[in-house]
Image (cartoon, grey):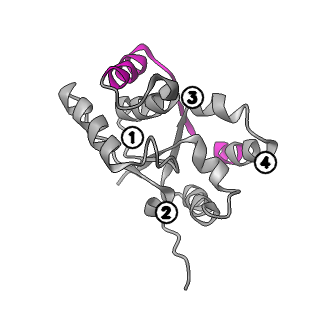
Amino acid sequence: MEKPRVYIDTSVFGGCFEPEFEIWSNGLMDDFKNGIYSPVVSQVVANEISKAPSFVKAKYAELSIYNLEILPLTNEVYSLAETYKLKQILSPKYFEDLLHIAIATINNIDILVSWNFKHIVHFEKIKLFNAVNLELSYKTINIFSPREVTTYEKEN
């Protein structure tokens, strides 16, 4: 059985250093290290990481030794993101968030993980993204926080 391909948005890397999220983000990084999931990012993530603090860049670089897959931005990705924008799922100001969803959709990613609860990991938004995907004959996308995906279990 193939390992699930998990698309990681930029918030997950930063989450490795935030007290509220670090347990779950680092747990997911351990899952990649242990071969439970295959890590996937995109050129959008790479661009966002290039502007991040050095410790976040270092965390991102760690994934490269675990067969990190970097997905390109294509015309099909931009077209789908534009459709999401036209449907007013998010405002144009958050186009990079639309690109994350479009890239994951176009590339048949098993799970997209993010800590962005306002624009990505949001029940109503996920329904709208998936309605567009189905309308255009794409598969639906599974979107979760790292806490819901990692195999790490916090001890009580």
Magenta extent: 61-86
Q: Does residue 70 show up?
A: yes
> Real-space Cα distance between discs 1 and 2?
18 Å
Secondary element at image label 3? helix
Residue 103 at what x, y percent from top left?
43, 30
Number of other residues with Cα within 10 Å of mark 1, as a class: few under 14, some 14 to 19, many 20 or more: some
Q: What number is the disc on residue 55? A: 4
Q: Nearer the N terminus, badge 4 or badge 2?
A: 4
**Label 2 with label 3: CB-CB less than 8 Å:** no
Secondary element at image label 2? helix
Query: Which three-letter amino acid code belongs to the residue tagged 2?
Result: Arg
**Label 4 with label 2: CB-CB less than 8 Å:** no
Instruction: Give the residue number, with chain letter if any, for mark 1.
Output: 109
Instruction: Give the residue number, with chain letter if any, for mark 2.
Output: 147
Q: Nearer the N terminus, badge 2 or badge 3?
A: 3
Quadrant location of the N terminus in the rendered image: bottom left
Instruction: Give the residue number, with chain letter if any, for mark 3.
Output: 44
At 45% across and 17% down in the image, what residue appears? 74
